[in-house]
Image: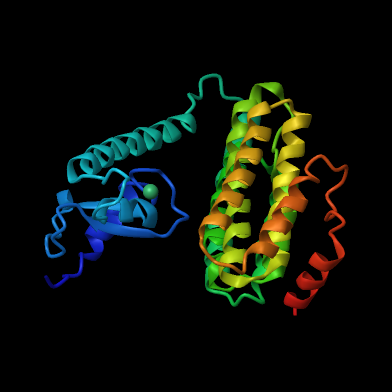
Amino acid sequence: MKRKKISGNDQAEVIFRSNRECVICSNHKRGDHIHHIDGNKTNNKFENLAFLCFDCHSDATMTGGLKKKLTPKTIMKFRDHKYQVVAIERENALKRFNSPIDGLTTEDLLTTTKSAIIIIEIEKIKEEYFSAEWTERPSIILKLNRFLDHTNFRVAVDIFNFFSIVADQTRFGMTTDVAVSIFTLTINFFPYSNKKEDDGKIFELGNECVNIAFSLIYDSIIHLKNYNIAMYGLTMLKYVHKKGKQHKIKQLGDRVLETYKEIERMLQRVGRNDLEIALRLVREFKSDLNGKNLSFPLLSDDLMKVIIQTAK
Ligand SMILES: [Zn+2]
């Protein structure tokens, strides 16, 4: 059977409707693949396609073994459900920004207008970032600091969405300086509020920060072997953990702990024997989660040596 190329539009549609997450396990960090549900690689009908991670893809294509194979029917069920959930989440996300404006004061109007202008400015910075070289990127990111005095939930969401795309591209050669800029901005823009009534939104943003940190850590270890970037990612986790405690948002701390587990699990299962150092690094940072400040923990001598060697 000769594979035909899936049209660009269909590819985009499959990826968009599944939110770039595996339709079975919702992960998007284990590699991804557009799977032909009926096994016929020439059948590129939209109905026959599903976005899967490498793990679930191998569960769908395996023969024999003790594990239960993912059947076409199961995959379709999961996929259709995933499309629904993603669509509903998107709708809700839009509603949240759509609060009614009765009794609008001139001050409210000023704030709204300011946010709109900032959002356009962020768009410009994004464009500038993606067309620049890695060496120019840190200073482009730091331009976001100029909005610090006018930040709010909407502005923060835009900034962290931007970072999430940036972090997803870590593997393509991110430099330590870019990671440092992201780290600095995260500390400046998260959390955007100290009010108890904003806890839900703070959790949401914190969750996004955790995802960004995860990408930085995992991708820099697996693809770049740049432990410096990983250490900034790990410190981001510590920062979010700290803020969770300060604001008494327990789920935020839990999220950080779950993420540590996920990183450890994934580093162990990649099946590479060069990840022992990374695993130790992750564990030493984990045991420092409750440390007072955000400086890197004191690492064991031999670990330190390896890290300095790879930093060159
Ligand atoms: Zn999966």
Relative to 273, does residue 96 appear above or below in the rendering?
Answer: above
Residue 139 appears in the rendering: no
* Furthest residue in direction top, as rendered: 103
* Along the line of sight, the residue nearer the viewer: 305 or 52: 305
Relative to 196, does residue 281 appear above or below in the rendering?
Answer: below
Quarter of the image where the C terminus is located? bottom right
Residue located 51% across and 63% down the image: 271
* Furthest residue in direction bottom, as rendered: 312
Tell me where residue 253 appears, x and y as whole percent.
Answer: 68, 34
Q: Residue 86: which quarter of the image?
A: top left
Tell me if 141 is positioned left or right of 72 in this view: right
Tell me where residue 246 appears, x and y as whole percent.
Answer: 78, 30
Residue located 18% across and 41% down the image: 73
Q: Residue 153: which quarter of the image?
A: top right
Residue located 66% across and 75% down the image: 136
Quarter of the image where the N terminus is located? bottom left
Tell me where residue 296 appears, x and y as whole percent.
Answer: 83, 56
* Along the line of sight, the residue nearer the viewer: 66 or 37: 66
Tell me where residue 170 appears, x and y as whole percent.
Answer: 57, 65
Q: Residue 81: which quarter of the image?
A: top left
Tell me if 264 is positioned left or right of 68 in this view: right
Residue located 18% across and 46% down the image: 72
Tell me if 298 is positioned left or right of 23 in this view: right
